[in-house]
Image: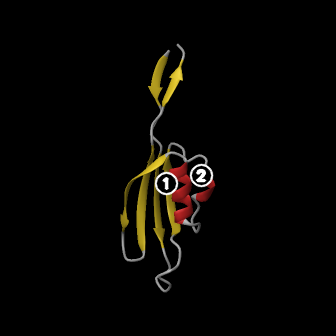
């Protein structure tokens, strides 16, 4: 048996909030996926809650690698799924 690391899954979410309402939730502007975001793919649509998407991804084995503000009302978060080994029989 040979153990081969799975390809890395990355998700980059850009988000914004309503500048008129500082208590408004952060909403997704774009979400880019390299690999897979399963089982959270449906939560990564523009206009949906960025916090709910991040919570789902973290619960699914992703970790936040980098996050920060772009402006006073927008920002980004980059998540990576912790790698596991896939075992193949040769």
Residue at the spot 45% in from the left edge and 63% down from the top edge = 14
Q: Earlier in the sequence, mark 2 or mark 1?
A: 1
Q: Secondary structure at mark 2?
A: loop
What residue lies at 44% left-to-right and 49% top-to-bottom?
Answer: 63
Report, in whole angstroms, how far the alpha carbon at label 2 lies from the one at label 1. Answer: 13 Å
Instruction: List the single residue furthest toward the right.
Output: 42
**Local crowd size for mark 1, using a 10 Å CA cut-off: few (<14), some (14–19), many (≥20):** few
Locate residue 20, reporting x and y percent: 48, 86
Badge nearest the viewer, 2 or 1: 2
Residue, x 59% and y 52% (percent of image)?
Answer: 40
Instruction: Answer above or below: position of 4 versus 11.
Output: above
Q: Which mark is residue 32?
A: 1
User: Which colour assignment does the render follow?
Assistant: secondary structure
Please state the horizontal and vertical placement of residue 85, each as a whole percent of the image.
Answer: 48, 29
Q: Residue furthest front?
A: 59
**Is 8 placed above or below 23 here?**
above
In this view, the residue in front, 50 or 33, is 50
Above or below, comparing residue 86 to residue 37 in the picture:
above
The relative height of residue 35 versus residue 84 in the rendered view (above or below) is: below
| Residue identifier under label 2 | 40
Q: Which mark is residue 2?
A: none
**Residue 57 percent across, percent down from the top left:** 53, 52
Classify 10 Å Cα crowding around label 2: few (below 14), some (14-19), many (20 and above): some
* Horizontal and vertical percent position of residue 46: 57, 65
For the residue labelled by badge 1, is the local secondary structure a helix, a strand or a loop?
strand
């Amino acid at each position: 048996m040979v153990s081969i690391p799975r390809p890395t899954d990355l998700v980059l979410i850009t988000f914004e909030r309503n500048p008129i309402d500082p208590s408004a939730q952060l909403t997704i502007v774009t979400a880019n996926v390299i690999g897979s975001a399963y089982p959270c793919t449906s939560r990564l649509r523009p206009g949906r809650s960025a916090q709910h998407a991040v919570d789902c991804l973290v619960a699914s084995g992703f970790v936040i690698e980098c996050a920060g503000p772009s402006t006073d009302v927008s920002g980004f978060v980059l998540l990576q799924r912790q790698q596991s080994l896939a075992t193949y029989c040769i």
